[in-house]
Amino acid sequence: MSATPSSSNPQHPERRETADAAELVALGAGAAPKPAAIGQLKRVGSWSACSPRERLRAEKALPEESALKALRRGEAAPLLVRVRRWLGRMGSNGGVLPNGGVLAVAALQCAAWLHSERLSIAIAKASGLPAGRRRPDAYSFPGRLIGWLVENGAVITLCNLRGLLPHPEPIPDERADASSTLVQTCGRCARIVARNVAISIVSNMIAETGSVLIHHLASTRLYSKVPYFVKQRRSANPLTLGALADWVRGNGVLQLFGGGLMLGLIESFLPAAAAAEVTNTPFTVGGFLRNFAVFRVVVDVAFYCGHRALHEHPLLYKHIHKRHHEHFTTNLRTNYHFTAPDLFIESAVPVFAGLAVLRKLLGVALSRFEIHLMLTYVAWHESGTHLGKPLPVISMYPPLSILYTPFTDVEATAIEFHEVHHNRRSCNYGITQWIDYLMGSRLLRAGGAGKKSPAA
């Protein structure tokens, strides 16, 4: 009895092509190769080793045999094959949607912004507003629902865009190859650090600058008829050359040396176990809601302490915080009118404190997407406090704010609260209102006069 010929036998090249084609089908569909199954096909090398369906797929894939051979030789796959595989993969930097899904959602949101006026009128019409009031009031239930969708939709999309970036890789813990020289080893480490720094800079810019740009779209397209608290004497457009100059002087410095260099170094020297934990910890909605509540409280307390210290100490105010208060009234350009140390105290320190409490004090394992989501929610809220007009697009606890904002005025004064801080400078030190309410430093306007918190 003769043995079944091997697929590597040069007398049977067509069987090798069949195995190649079957493997190419799997790779082209975005599936991971199955060495055991492919190896079995190579060993048997006969049509009987394939089911009829696999045989049909293999026959159809035969014209693409050269692509598989290119893959085996380590050469670049055809562009369409690579794009298809990339679109089907999850974001390597912490995304929860496939890359193609992220791009589709982002495209839908862009289309919604372009037609936001029509969407707003359609929602108002569906809500039964009379013909003369097709634009819903910002704090009516339809207006708050739109604001809730804008806030959460923008933050989740920004987080998924961060997930499209390459995954930061720590410097390997193992010893360098004995054949590598010191210069080669240092060069490899430097390339890893530079790569992680670049990823950190772009990731933070997506969250912070992306939040400002979407707020600008909301303010000018969706809520263009809502007046500012105070008549504006300077441009509110964050895309002007003047805004860019402000950004370079303050935000740009912190993005480069804080959000970029510092975070890049942290990612580079992260222990392997910690890097694996951040990468492999699953994201759950319930866990995020619990962790974000703790994170929000810690961030608010740290912000209040740092911000109040900047106001109470004359030297700190003069040399660090005074520049920010050159804007007596706020608009989105105020987000760029900082010094780098000011941003570090008010932005970086609170979020580091929140993450430290969760991970070190409470021992909570956090996924990369969860960290991105918490940081982006805070960045969105902080940039929104400088909108300068009363819009329902920021809240203290955005995922569940729709459950309480339609029935209370808890968040209705969130933006006015910080506007009054810029007007008066001796009140409203928190980024949210609850600490100032407890400390008696909450102050709101009422017909031009100050109205102290009942707790004062």
Image (tube, grey):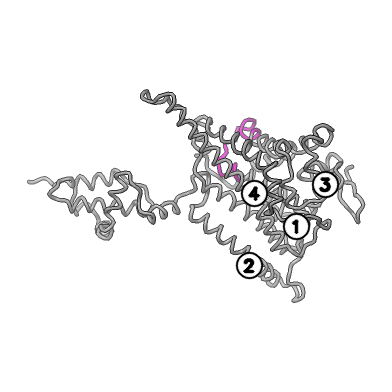
Magenta stretch, main secondary structure class = helix
Q: Quadrant of residue 50?
A: bottom left
Q: Amino acid at mark 4?
A: Thr
- Whichever of labels 2 and 4 marks the residue nearer the N terminus, that label is 2
The residue indicated by pointer 1 is 391
Tell me whether the residue at label 2 lies in contact with that at label 3, contact meaning CB atoms closer than 8 angstroms.
no
The residue indicated by pointer 3 is 422
SS of the residue under disc 2: loop
Q: Residues within 10 Å of mark 2 (few under 14, many from 20)?
A: few
- Whichever of labels 3 and 1 marks the residue nearer the N terminus, that label is 1
Q: Amino acid at mark 3?
A: His
Q: Nearer the viewer, residue 118 or 141?
A: 118
SS of the residue under disc 3: helix
Q: Is label 1 or label 4 in front?
A: 4
Q: Residues within 10 Å of mark 3 (few under 14, many from 20)?
A: many
The segment highlighted magenta reads: 356-372
The residue indicated by pointer 2 is 115
Q: Quadrant of residue 198?
A: top right
Q: Amino acid at mark 1?
A: Leu
